[in-house]
Image (spheres, rainbow, N blue to C red):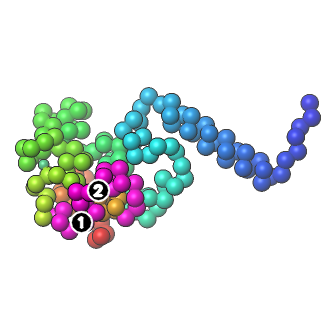
Amino acid sequence: MAQELISPQEQKQRLKGWVLEECTRQWNGSETGAYVRRYLASPAATVLSTYKALTKPLSSMLTQMRTNKIGLATFLHKIKVTDDPYCDCGTAEQTVSHVLFDCTLFTTIRSEYPELSASSTLKGLLTESKAALAASSFMQRTGLLKQFRYSSFPTV
Ligand SMILES: [Zn+2]
């Protein structure tokens, strides 16, 4: 059987295409990760660009907000760490969306973050670099996530 002769550049292109095709196939066929697929329709190198400018604590915060596996009452209740999924404000379950947009306990802090306006969407906030930085900084300032209390976050 004769082998097709192709240039190294062509080999690299074909390999990249195959890898992306395979990653996309696995991404779409996976039974887990449905929450993350809300924000990231398909795997792509551009996803990493959001994280490049972030420090380790910020990157960790963003990942936790995107996956919804985060130390807020709703998730802690889901994994049976707490009995109550509700926020201390008493109006709703304590989710990422509730804390970022609606919780009345953080109205003053929220006013310093125009990215968290009512016209913002959770998807937009967690996928655009500058907005993701603001969301991460805001979440740290709420003090709800104790593991980040000693981390230093840049001022937006
Ligand atoms: Zn609340």
Tell me if I can see residue 112 in this picture. yes
First along the sequence among labels 1 and 2? 1
Relative vertical location of residue 53 with respect to residue 66 in this rendering, above or below: below
In the image: residue 111, left or right of residue 49: left
Disc 1 from disc 2: Cα separation: 11 Å
Kindly tell me whether residue 62 is visible in this rendering.
no
Identify the amino acid type marked 2: Ser
Is residue 17 rendered to the left or right of residue 37? Answer: right
Q: Secondary structure at mark 2?
A: loop
In magenta stretch: residue 123: yes
Tell me where residue 47 appears, x and y as whole percent: 48, 53
Q: Residue drawn at (25%, 47%), measured in percent from left and top?
A: 96
**Residue, x 7% and y 44% (percent of image)?**
90
Q: Residue at x 20, y 31 (%)?
A: 80
**Quick check: 33 left or right of 155?**
right
Q: Which residue is mark 1?
A: 113
Is the CB–ligand 1 distance for label 1 below 8 Å? no
**At x 54% / y 49%, what residue is drawn?**
44
Question: Is 86 a magenta residue?
Answer: no
Residue farthest right in this picture? 2
Q: Tell me the residue that label 2 is attached to.
A: 120
Q: Position of residue 120 (x, y in %)?
A: 29, 56
Q: Which residues are magenta?
A: 109-130
Within 10 Å of the Cα at label 1, are there few (<14), some (14-19), or many (20+) other Cα atoms? some
Give the secondary structure at mark 1: loop
Amino acid identity at mark 1: Tyr
